[in-house]
Amino acid sequence: YDGHRFGITVNNGRIQLWTVFDLLVSWDSKDVVEVTVPTNAKDNVCGLCGNYNGNPKDDNLLGPACSNSTDHQDDDDEVFAQSWIVDNTTCTANCHPGQHGSGDNQCFYPKAIIDRECSKLMDNKTSPFKDCLKLKRTTDLDQFRLSCVYDLCHIDGDLNDGICRFAEIMAWDCTDNEKADVSGWKAKVTACEVPICPNNMIYKACGSDNPRTCLNINTPQTAGTATCTEGCFCEDNKVQEGDRCISPEQCGCFYNNGYLATGDKLLLPNCSVEIQCVGGNVTVSRPVGCNENEECRIENEVVDCYCKTGYIRNDNHECA
């Protein structure tokens, strides 16, 4: 989606939201969210990501749910996280240290094993990410190690899954923040298995960090990118549409700052016209309308003809 105020793109499994004021939010479709703000946000932000004032020692400022003060810090990570819960009747903040279960000292595996596995990933001479680690500040390296130990300690399932997951996060960080080439890292981490790609995609240890998709098919490709990334990709003669690969001529249509795959239909807000993509960036329209006992409205951000209040749709798809 490419709108006037914000856009949403999918890049090798990562969903990215960007805005006109240079806010970038990246989600890896699992459990990692990265928020990037412009430099003019210094000293003007607060919350779980800190206050962006150049001093990492005061980033644990408590939020309004647990403190009336703007400069009260707490070393208890759970209290800090709880303090930033927004007003919500179903999820109230617990602001009392020591009342959050077993606490951070819990570790499901022997600490020596956790330290050994984190050292394999963090050693700047033997790590698959050694070239990236050399580019990082000492404070960032310390935080990485703390995060590694914390995350692996709190895995109550297969430790290998956790090790590979943390390595994946490191690869993402190295590629995005340090622009480092970490291609082939997965083959060097014994805890990882080469992924099975969906549909007709293929695995590459070093694929383009800006793959061709139906959304950017008309944008000139830059010859030779600075970095590559590991993952599932389309073959060279195909382009990506969602999680599948198709021929460029099979791409759909751009319509009203959005994209429709070939065969997709879109009902306009008044439910009087239906737009259908027939492929090749060609759309056709036809008049439509709601049936008896139906009304045009939006539900879950989808415009359609829904049953009026007091009616339900039967097996004949009629509202009765």
Image: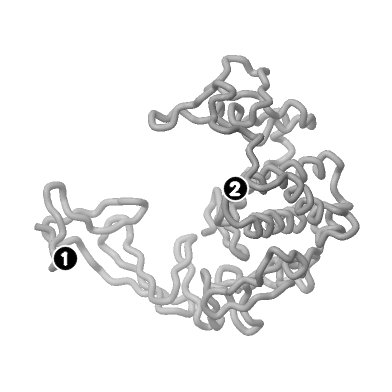
**Three-letter amino acid code at the position of disc 2:** Thr
Residue 16: x %, y % from top left: 59, 55
Assess disc 2: are there few (<14), some (14-19) or many (≥20) residues with their C-alpha within 10 Å of its C-alpha.
Answer: some
Residue 197: x %, y % from top left: 58, 74
| Tag 2 secondary structure | strand
State the separation of the CA atoms marked 1 and 2: 40 Å
| Tag 1 secondary structure | loop
Q: Nearer the viewer, residue 119 or 187?
A: 119
Q: Nearer the viewer, residue 197 or 209?
A: 197
Query: Is residue 16 visible from the viewing direction of this image?
Result: no
**Three-letter amino acid code at the position of disc 1:** His
Task: Tell me the mark number nearer the camera, choosing from 1 and 2.
Answer: 1
Check disc 1 and report the residue beneath it: 317
Q: Residue at x 38, y 76 (%)?
A: 263
Q: Is residue 37 above or below residue 89?
A: below
Q: Residue at x 68, y 42 (%)?
A: 150
Q: Residue at x 62, y 15 (%)?
A: 69
Which colour scheme appears in the figure?
A: one colour
* Image quarter (top left, top right, bottom left or bottom right) of the C terminus: bottom left
Residue 259: x %, y % from top left: 48, 66
Check disc 2 and report the residue beneath it: 19
Query: Is residue 280 visible from the viewing direction of this image?
Result: yes
Q: Specify whether 28 is left or right of 92.
A: right
Assess disc 1: are there few (<14), some (14-19) or many (≥20) residues with their C-alpha within 10 Å of its C-alpha.
Answer: few
Q: Residue at x 73, y 66 (%)?
A: 190
Residue 177: x %, y % from top left: 76, 52
Q: Residue furthest top?
A: 68
Q: Residue furthest front?
A: 110
